Structure formats: C-alpha cells, structure tokens
C-alpha cells in the first residue's frame, strides 16, 4: 500500500510543514491516548495496561532500527539518555560533533569539561575529514535539525573505526522517515515526538553490548530494578538496566504510532517525503536533495507563511520546511504560492 492509502488516519490543517518541530499523531495513537486519559480521569484501571504500551513501543523501535529489543532502553529526553555514556568517558576525552549540532547532543558531553573532556566541532561538509586520531567519540545527528543535512553514516563509521572512536548518534530527526542500519554504531538515541509522531516524553536508546559494559546506569530506579522498596537492587543484564521510569501516557501514544510506521514501511515513507521535499525545492529553484527537511534562504518567508496559514519554522535565519507522511502536494503548492 502507498502512503496515500493511510491519509485518512490524520486530520492536519492544510499547510503543516513543521514535523521537524513536532509530528502529528495518527488516529490510532490519538484514540489510544484519549482512552487512557479517560480511564485515568475516573480511576478505571491500574497502570499496568499503560505500561504494556512501553513494551510494545520498545519492540517496535527496535525493529525500526534493526536492533534486538534487549539492546534498547526507554527514557524521556535525549540528553538524559546520553548522560550515562558521557559519564563513562575517561578524563581528557575528545568529542567531535557538528558545528550546528542540537545542544541535547552537545551539553551532556560539555558538562564534563571540568575533568578535561573537550568538545570540538566541524561543519557538516567537512565532518568526515575531521574524524582524525585524537578523537575519542563522534557524537552527531543522523539528520541535522537546523539544515536537514543527512549524515554520510557509512563514511563516518569507516573513519571512526580506523581510529577506534565511538559513534554516538542522535536520530531524533531521522527515525520514522529515513531507513537506518545500526551495524557498527555504538549508541543511538531518538526522541519520538517528531517523525515518530508520538507524545513528547517517550525517548528510545540503543546501546551496543560493548559500550553498555562501560557505562553505569546513572538513573537506576524502581522500573529498571523491578523493585518497589528497600535495597535489593537487581538490574537486568541488558539495556533495560538503563531504563528511566516511563511517562505512561507518552508511551501509550507512542506504541500505535511506531507500529503504524512499521506497517506503512519506512522505505515508502522515505520515498513520499523526499518526493514532496524535492517538489518544494524545485519550486524554489533549488536542485534535488536527499532530506525531508528543506532549509533555504528565503527573505520574508516567515511573514508570507504566517499570512497564508502555512506553519513552518525559521532556524538560524533560514526557512525550514519539513515533509512527512501526512504532507501532500496541496501543502507544497500552498507554501509555494505563499512565497510567490
């Protein structure tokens, strides 16, 4: 089935081109969340049925990135998910990131400056060349939030492996539309409220077994330890030891949204999103690209979009429009008409 066959599962107002800020929930996710909220309102059930959604969401995310579910942990934010990895770095480690990297994948490393951890940057176009001896961690987004630049992951992995550097990815702007292969990746974290179209508060992380053995579960809690009271802490031997206590309702919405992504197929969504993004790029006189996010220098775009009811974003002074499964050619034309 094509993406268009699922269009009835969303009800966006025309002109929503801002999935890079947050995604719109499909009907199964919205209805599951409303049902849970209704039960909460009157105390109709215990919490265990809501937590079953956490299990489903974890397994669905694992399938989306091609990882065993045992290597996936759940949490609430990208920065908190990265904290145990950053804390495991030796004193004096050097971390390389992109010069426009979103700060959730910068600050968790930078707070260790007092013990000599150094964060250095390189622009996207020179990023692979900057992976040189002396770099201990390559921490970078698979798709850049500000520009939509798609990482050359095979090249990054090859360069990192040559010098023995860890590869830690923020895939918040990628999972849900960009096919991914995590072979050779040490860690990958992603918030689900953008391209996975889930309520904010459900984050997922992949930890390779080798890296996991080097990290301490800094957020150890009742959920990971499966114990309500006392000092008998028995953490799982797999990535679930790094679970943060889940925000139930966020995962209630996440499970059906992620499962729908699987049903439609990321490859099909990728084809749909890139097609619309490139149609928009062509209308702006730009060459085709490989991203669902279009960043362009269009003076007055914010005002023109506001007047036409088109919702996009401005990042670093540039227009940022993003296209996802519920976007249509009508949205593209509405945006181009506004800019003309």
Image: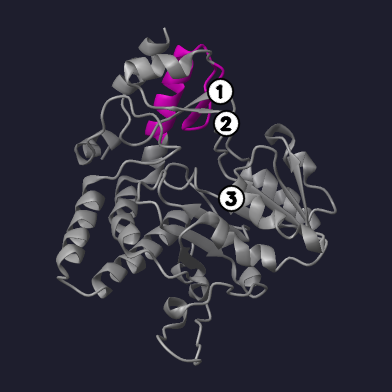
Q: Residue at x 59, y 66 (%)?
A: 208
Few, some or many residues within 10 Å of mark 2 (<14, 14–19, 20+):
many
Secondary structure of residue under mark 3: helix
Q: Position of residue 198 (x, y in %)?
A: 35, 50
| Lower sequence index among marks 3 and 1 | 3
Q: Residue at x 48, y 67 (%)?
A: 73
Few, some or many residues within 10 Å of mark 3 (<14, 14–19, 20+):
some
Q: Would residue 162 appear left or right of 229 to someone viewing this image?
A: right
Q: Quadrant of the C terminus?
A: top left
Q: Which residues are magenta?
A: 271-297
Q: Would residue 303 appear left or right of 253 to someone viewing this image?
A: right
Secondary structure of residue under mark 2: loop
Residue under label 2: 147
Q: Would residue 108 appear left or right of 57 to someone viewing this image?
A: right
Q: Residue at x 62, y 50 (%)?
A: 105
Q: Say if the magenta span includes residue 241.
A: no
Residue under label 1: 318
Residue 24 position (above or below residue 14): below
Distance, label 3 to label 1, CA atoms, is: 21 Å
Colour basis: one colour
Q: Position of residue 123 (x, y in %)?
A: 72, 35
Distance, label 2 to label 1, CA atoms, is: 9 Å
Q: Would residue 222 appear left or right of 209 to someone viewing this image?
A: left
Q: Position of residue 219 (x, y in %)?
A: 54, 72
Q: How many marks?
A: 3
| Lower sequence index among marks 2 and 1 | 2
Residue 229 position (above or below residue 205): below
CB atoms at circles 2 and 1 under 8 Å apart?
A: yes
Secondary structure of residue under mark 1: strand
């Amino acid at each position: 089935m094509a993406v268009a066959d699922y269009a009835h599962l969303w009800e966006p107002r025309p002109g929503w081109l801002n999935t890079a800020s947050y995604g719109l929930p499909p009907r199964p996710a919205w209805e599951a969340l409303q049902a849970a909220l209704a039960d909460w309102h009157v105390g109709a059930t215990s919490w265990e049925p809501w937590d079953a959604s956490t299990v489903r969401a974890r397994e669905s995310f694992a399938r989306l990135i091609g990882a065993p579910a045992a290597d996936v942990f759940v949490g609430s934010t990208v920065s908190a998910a990265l904290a145990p990895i950053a804390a495991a770095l030796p004193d004096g480690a050097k971390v390389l990131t992109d010069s426009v990297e979103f700060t959730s994948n910068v600050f968790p490393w930078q707070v260790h400056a007092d013990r000599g951890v150094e964060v250095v940057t390189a622009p996207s176009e020179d990023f692979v060349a900057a992976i040189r001896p002396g770099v201990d961690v390559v921490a970078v987004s698979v798709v850049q939030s500000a520009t939509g630049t798609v990482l050359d992951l095979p090249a990054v992995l090859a360069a990192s492996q040559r010098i023995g550097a860890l590869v830690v990815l923020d895939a918040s702007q990628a999972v849900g539309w960009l096919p991914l292969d995590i072979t050779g990746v040490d860690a990958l974290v992603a918030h689900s409220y953008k391209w996975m179209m889930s309520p904010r508060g459900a984050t997922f992380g992949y930890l390779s077994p080798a890296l996991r053995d080097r990290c301490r579960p800094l957020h150890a809690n009742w959920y990971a330890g499966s114990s309500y009271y006392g000092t008998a802490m028995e953490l799982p031997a797999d990535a679930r030891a790094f679970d943060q206590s889940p925000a139930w309702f966020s995962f209630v919405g996440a499970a059906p949204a992620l499962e729908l992504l699987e049903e439609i197929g990321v490859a099909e969504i990728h084809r749909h999103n890139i097609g619309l993004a490139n149609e928009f790029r062509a209308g702006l006189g730009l060459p085709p690209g490989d991203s669902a996010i279009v960043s362009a220098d269009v003076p007055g775009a914010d005002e023109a979009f506001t007047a036409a009811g088109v919702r996009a974003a401005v990042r670093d002074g540039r227009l940022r429009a993003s296209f996802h499964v519920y976007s249509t050619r009508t949205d593209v034309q509405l945006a181009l008409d506004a800019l003309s």
